[in-house]
Image: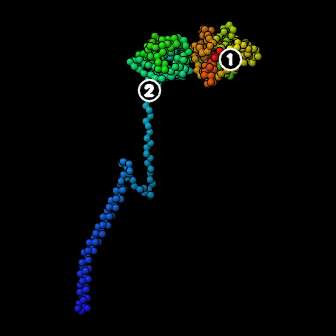
Amino acid sequence: MSKKKYSNKAKNRKSQKKSSLKPVLSTIIVCILMGVAFYIGTRFDSIQSNLIKKPDNTQNAPITKAPDSTQNTQVTEQPTVTTAPEQKRTVSLTLYFPNSNVDGVVPIQRQVEIDKDEKLEEVIFKELQKGPKGTSQDSTIPQGTKLLSVEVKESICYLDLSKEFVDNNPGGTAFETVLINSIVNSLTELSEIKKVQFLIEGEKREVYSHMIFDEPFERNDSFIKTADSKAETTEKEIYGLGNKVLTALKEKDMEALSSLIHPDKGVRFSPYTYVEVEKDIILSAEQIKTSLDSEKLYIWGAYDGIGEPIELTFGEYLEKFVYNQDFINADEVLYDQYSQRGNTINNVFEAYTDAHVLEYHFRGFDPNYEGMDWESLKLVFEQNDGHWYLTGIVHDQWTI
């Protein structure tokens, strides 16, 4: 075979070989392109899915876009969730408090804002504890009394009170009658209450101090009195005079004190609550003006327990038996209320029959004495020509 012929045959074989490779290469290229296209497509779907995918454990979270650095962005704060204030309501109560003569109770209207679910029975008792003037100083409820529970069953209000209601009762049938009627008449203003049963520490008590106490009390309309405007005016005047007297004593202003003393009777000084009408020292208004600087010694009575004479100047007596405590800031002030606290007989209302008495009382000073170091100062006022004047200063404290 000639070289030329061989060469032509080789070319033909190479050409045929190339022709047969072209379809194969085309198929491979197409497959590669399809594979690349499929890969790119799946990646795009994955990226898009991640962009709109919800955050873990979060519902309905909005799709956010990256802020444009060329524009100002605003941050919207989430509103603060606040709890709605507890609903309150205002009620009108008719409360009954002792009258000035302590022989009845008089109605007083009071508007009170209370919690939505608060019991009216509890509110009424708490308001009675505040007294007619809104302060516990003139409350009839015995000091320290706690309302343990209150429940109404079959028109009977069961009022469970702490033992202080009994233990701190100052005593006397008249006081108890006023106290019980004050509470019962106030509670029976509620239509669902017809009677009140008192309980002490969850138990019925046979007797209070003098009154039968184990049966429910009914409303007593006959004990309700109309408000006496004249009596109220007198009471306000006496309170005002008492404040003036204490101010003068505290500041040792004898000129001011003398102007408040009865022009005819003067003022009697009693070192203890038993007034010795024939023995206690009486000083006139004129004597009071100069007595603070006097060195004159008086025998004011006898010391409790030892019986030795109380021999002091007026100034010394003033320091020891009159304004020996800051009585103008006393724990409580009582108006025309009898109290028997110590062993010494309290005869103030017997010694001064036509008078009004203010008692300024401290319950105690040192907790170690458990109230045995209490002290009181009683100011007695009597009328003269339509005006009220100081006629007695009575000191009171624990005696042996």
Observer-nearest residue: 238 or 39? Answer: 39
Mark identifier at residue 321: 1
In three-dimensional space, the C-alpha distance between marks 1 and 2, rounded to whole angstroms, equals: 47 Å
| Spot occupied by residue 228 in the image (x, y as percentages of width and height) | 51, 13
Observer-nearest residue: 385 or 378? Answer: 378
Residue 20 lies in quadrant: bottom left
| Spot occupied by residue 222 in the image (x, y as percentages of width and height) | 46, 10
Judge the density around disc 1: few (<14), some (14-19), many (≥20) Cα neighbours within 10 Å.
many
Residue 216 lies in quadrant: top left
Please report the residue visible at 46 percent of the width from the left and 27 percent of the height from the top. 113
Mark identifier at residue 118: 2
Q: Is residue 308 left or right of residue 128?
A: right
Answer above or below: position of 233 versus 82.
Answer: above
For badge 1, the amino acid type reads Phe
Please report the residue visible at 59 percent of the width from the left and 14 percent of the height from the top. 340
Residue 376 lies in quadrant: top right
**Outermost residue toward the top in this view:** 278
The answer to whether residue 159 is seen in the rendering is: yes
For badge 2, the amino acid type reads Glu
Observer-nearest residue: 139 or 231? Answer: 139
Of callouts 1 and 2, which one flags the residue occurring earlier in the amino acid sequence? 2
Q: How is the image coloured?
A: rainbow
The answer to whether residue 105 is seen in the rendering is: no
Mark identifier at residue 74: none
Judge the density around disc 2: few (<14), some (14-19), many (≥20) Cα neighbours within 10 Å.
few
| Spot occupied by residue 166 in the image (x, y as percentages of width and height) | 52, 17
| Spot occupied by residue 302 in the image (x, y as percentages of width and height) | 70, 12
Answer above or below: position of 8 versus 192.
Answer: below
Callout 1: SS: helix
Observer-nearest residue: 197 or 351? Answer: 197
